[in-house]
Image (cartoon, rainbow, N blue to C red):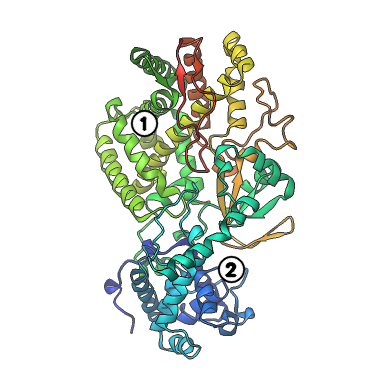
Amino acid sequence: MPENNANIPPLWPWLTPRCRRILLDGFKLAAAAGAERVEPDHLLTALCADAKSTAYFMLQHAGISPESLCPPHAAPPVDQPKTLPDQFSDATLAVLRGAAAAAGVTGTRHICTEHLLMGLPADPIVGSVLSQRGFSRSAALRGVAAWRRKSFITQRVGLGLEPQNRLRLKLTPTGLLTRFFSALALPAKVYIGKSLLHPRFRRNPYPLYDQLRRQTALRQDPVLPVWTAYRFADAQALLKDPRFARAPFTMDAFPRAALEQLKAPEEPDRLFAMMLFSDPPRHTRLRTAFMRAMGAVSLAALRPAMEAQSLNLLGQAKKRGRLDIVADFAVPFPVFVITALFGLPPEDMPRLKSWSDQMTPAIEINPTARQLDLADAAYEEFRLYLENKLHTISTHPDAHLLSALITRGGADISPAQFVANCMLLLMAGHETTTSLIANGVWLLHTHPEALADLRADPGKMPAAVEEILRFESPVQWTGRMAAEDIDWQGRTIRRGELILFSLGAANRDPAQFDHPNKFDIHRTDNRHLAFGMGIHFCLGAMLARMEAQVALEVLLRTFPRARLKQPFVRWRKGLVLRCPLRLAMDMA
């Protein structure tokens, strides 16, 4: 008799993307077997077919061959069967509840493949098979501990390539020695193997880009579980390839009945309601609605306000007698612009920036539990703030972005999608533009010929901004996930694997640009990838270009004899965004 779904706790929000992929494979295996529901043995087969999962490692660590449990011919079908089951069996739901309990035992926030494996003994049949092979609770916990020792770097490093959690070292001789000897192999993989953890990827990545670009079109990072691509042609082609997705294992891929069993919301919320983490057809609908609203707002009408705010910020610096381009200009200026674009009051800028700063780590890989909690709190405050503002804003369709969204795009997006994508625009609207402006100031003041040309002819500023975007791309990396097994130039990228495209390397590719390592504001053929490519091409590219042009023009006009106090800069932590930490200037 079916269990009462009301007694089942919400499971969907805690399932990792890899775990969701295993569940989807279970549906395909059930369909291939002609089953009416997904059973626990289908999940076991799916786990045993994933050779890179923690569950697979745990079985091997326990002395069990995953292939012996599920022979190769039992792997999930490559093609989607025409008729899929629409539900999990009661036994499978019991396994999922056991997985949630196992996550709590191991101190993990989310349900991962190791927890699925630990939940399978809840089924008498599968549990008996595992028990006969020697897989016990203690063996499972030993396997989890071994996996964490083996891969502590990859588990604790995010897309920004900074430690996301403190390493918990047991203060015992065995624990310390294990970590010490495990770490001995890391420097060779980082420095000799040229992992993305290499510190030069932050300080000056371009020599490494050149070296790796010459070696191969596609490579697996020696430390991190990602593929990387460095050539312009490959990045351009792969970014437009529909087989590479932003989020292929979301709610859209699951039957509605199964989502109800997992207590999923009616539609994706927060991150997965953002177009950045959506794929067609959901992405197409969201992007169309926001493009329609952006097209209704006159960006040219914002230009006078941009110029006035630039003068205001620089005037304040002049009164103080000191100017840090990053903190005093490149950071507050884009926040003002995005606030004005939304039609929100200037006095709310500090709150909006704070929410954005707290939300940004949530879009990285493997954020900490604290970062997720802060992001959740910031998102909820922003949601309540936005709902309150919607009652008071102008409803003129061309007044600003919020009113344009309500009058022109509101019918095509839900309230959750409205809030999520406004938060996305808020985050994207200031971080990348801050980097663009700061990089531009640094490049121009370390290339005096270009600076002199611009001072003599400000009409060259649009071309100069394009060269800044190419030469020091604010966003150095972007990523996609393989929605299926993909063969590319002799390499096989497996379904669910992550590939990172180096926009910074592609924009310095000699196969695409003449003298790519020369900063040349007179460059004519400058089709760079700084704003991405394909369906996820930056929605605010035109606005970012205008902001940079205005900011640099006003700066050169206000301080015509300004110079950097120190031409050598420290770059912000992380791999994705390239931006100086500080740029102190002598205003002369």
Could you say which quadrant of the image residue 63 lies in? bottom right
Compared with 556, 87 (above or below) is below
Classify mark 2: helix, strand or loop.
loop
Q: Is residue 84 visible?
A: no
Lateral position of residue 124 relative to residue 73, left or right: left
Classify mark 1: helix, strand or loop.
helix
Q: Residue at x 73, y 36 (%)?
A: 510
Q: Are marks 2 and 1 in contact (CB under 8 Å)?
A: no
Compared with 206, 67 (above or below) is below
Q: Is residue 186 visible?
A: yes
Q: Residue 239 in the image: state x and y as whole percent.
A: 62, 46
Pointer 1 local density, CA inside 10 Å: few below 14, some 14–19, many at least 20: many
Compared with 285, 106 (above or below) is below
Q: Residue 19 in the image: state x and y as whole percent.
A: 47, 67
Specify the amino acid type for callout 2: Gln
Label ID, residue 80: 2
Q: Residue 296 in the image: state x and y as whole percent.
A: 44, 29
Q: Residue at x 62, y 63 (%)?
A: 494
**In this view, the mark in front (2 or 1):** 1
Residue tagged 1: 342
Image quarter of the N terminus = bottom left
Q: Residue at x 36, y 29 (%)?
A: 339
| Observer-nearest of 28 and 256 | 28
Pointer 2 local density, CA inside 10 Å: few below 14, some 14–19, many at least 20: some
Could you say which quadrant of the image residue 225 lies in? bottom right
Could you say which quadrant of the image residue 136 lies in? bottom left
